[in-house]
Amino acid sequence: MTAQTSMLHIRVDDDTKEQATEALSAMGLSVSDAVRLFLRRVVIDQAFPLELKVPNAETLAAMQESRAMMAKRRARFATADELFTDLEKNSRK
């Protein structure tokens, strides 16, 4: 049985919509995705959700690397030992 859906209409100025669409796109979300996510968090937490932000350059690079690895279906490290060595090395920064 599929859940019934309802259309939600909101008014927002064009500039805000354009800027929000751009920022959400950088996070991999559409405006509709963001509104659904927002409403689900309100329901689950019974509170106003935490703020989402556009990822910084380092996080964005990691996300792009991850997507590339998933597309190639290969791991960055050949073994768990290599992974832990890299984690230990980079945790000292």
Image: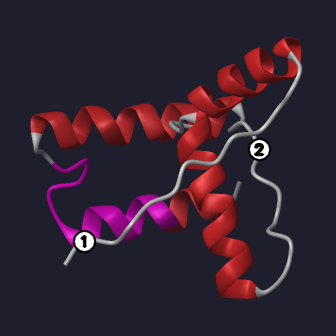
Q: Secondary structure at mark 1?
A: loop
The image shows residue 44 at horizontal and vertical percentages of 65, 85
State the residue in front, 82 or 7.
7
Q: In terms of secondary structure, what is the magenta stretch mainly?
A: helix
Q: Which residue is mark 2?
A: 53
Q: Residue at coordinates 79% horizontally, 86% vertically from top-left?
A: 46
State the residue in front, 43 or 51.
43
Q: Say what amino acid the circle numbered 1 marks.
A: Thr
Q: Quadrant of the N terminus?
A: bottom left
Q: Which residues are magenta?
A: 75-87
The answer to whether 20 appears left or right of 47 in the picture is: left
Q: Quadrant of the C terminus?
A: bottom right
31 lies above or below 3: above
Q: Which colour style is shown?
A: secondary structure
The answer to whether 87 appears left or right of 10 in the picture is: left
Q: Dot 2: few (<14), some (14–19), or many (≥20) neighbours within 10 Å?
A: few
